[in-house]
Image: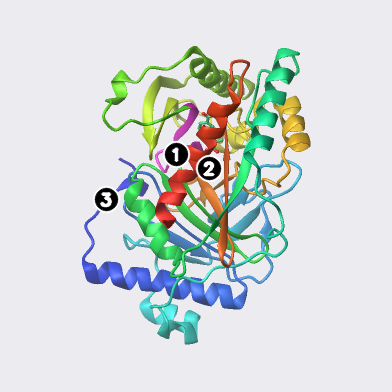
Amino acid sequence: MSKGLETRAYTDNQQAFFFGQIKKMAAWATQTGKAFAFWREPKSDNIQAVADFSDKKDRLTDQVRNREKGFAISPFSQNSDGFFIKADLYLSQNGDGSHSEDLLDQIFEEHTKAPEEALHYHLSEGQETSTPTQESDYKKMVTDAVMAIESGKFEKVVPSKMKHETLPDNFDLFHTFLKACEKYPSAFVCVCSLPEVGTWFCATPEILVRQDEEGIFRTMALAGTQVADPEVPLAEIAWRQKEIEEQALVSRYIINCFKKIRLREFEEHGPKTVRAGGLTHLRTEFRVDTHAVGQPEVAHQMLELLHPTSAVCGMPKKPATEFIELHEKHDREFFSGYLGPSNISGVTAAYVNLRCMKVLADKAMLFAGAGVTQDSDPEKEWKETEAKCMTLLNTLR
Ligand SMILES: C=C(O[C@@H]1C=C(C(=O)O)C=C[C@H]1O)C(=O)O
């Protein structure tokens, strides 16, 4: 098992101390205009955090490739850059973060006294006015998508919606984060907060790329969705042709990307039915031993080629993107983009920003999409997006 996936027992004191540090970091960073992120990787209990000391955030360019330590967040649109949060400060619950208590207190100064308050986070201006997607508009979009598919414009598209939820009076983002960590042990749970962007929170089931310190590269084709019936064992869940084809398209897309970088030796496992919160999906996992195949740059190369995958955009990519740009009334911003740690404890990972929300002062903007193919039913796709939104709504209510 790689270093990032260890689990350890923490004493209550250790935990309270570490959680206090994260709260102090967030208070200091928010009040001084610094970017920060904290996260927990799937099947790990190690919460990690980074903060960038600079006032102006770097646009995401070559930092991941250049092996800089930090945290990357990239939007859905390929026309705008993401951001890179440098790990000037790195905290890790398992003790890998190498900052002494004194040094941290010095950095956080007056913020050291207020760790009991609700977690502070950056707010972005300008988005509060965008209106949530109406059910009728979403269904019309699905109908239009099916027509476009029938007329041969593309094979698959993933229309999305945006939904508002009022935050509870006693809302505490850190508490919500911990609740999501507990409820969704297999998800990548993350808070990413920048003055330029605002604050995003996700509990996503989807790895875009992950390469660990042993050089093992992973990605996955995740698509096809059903609301999980806890009574039915995973092995007994049946899939319709529609979902099987939809997921196979994503697998094919990934294999094509491997071909583009002339990578022939990869392991393919699946498709298998997997649970993600209250949902089940079909998933094929891909694994490459980058040392054995002599291609150490697979993660960087694949990141450029994969994003956005047909799981969140469609196939072929260009006409599907055009459909999304033309039909969706909201700006996806960082929804269905990617985010994750870069060169932290030997791990570089980008997860697809799904089951996510943008956190505002008194409300959240939730985002969800559903893969539309020729056989899609507008009612079913709408219900699927509602079910996807429940992942985070269940941590708020
Ligand atoms: C687009 C989303 O999820 C993606 C789309 C899926 C689908 O269409 O069945 C399933 C998993 C994800 O790859 C989302 O969660 O908003």
How many marks on residues?
3
Determine which quarter of the picture holds residue 52.
bottom right
Which residue position is annotated with label 1? 205
Mark 2: C-beta under 8 Å from nearest atom of ligand 1: yes
Give the secondary structure at mark 3.
loop
Q: Residue at 64%, 66% (x, y): give it.
A: 195
Q: Amino acid at mark 3?
A: Thr
Residue 258, placed above or below residue 85: above
Q: Nearer the viewer, mark 3 or mark 1?
A: 1
- The residue nearer to you, when weighing 378 against 246, is 378
Residue 325, placed above or below residue 189: above
Q: Residue at 47%, 72% (x, y): give it.
A: 25
Give the secondary structure at mark 1.
loop
Residue 39 appears at what percent x and percent y?
A: 44, 55
Q: Amino acid at mark 1?
A: Pro
Which residue position is annotated with label 2? 354
Mark 1: C-beta under 8 Å from nearest atom of ligand 1: yes
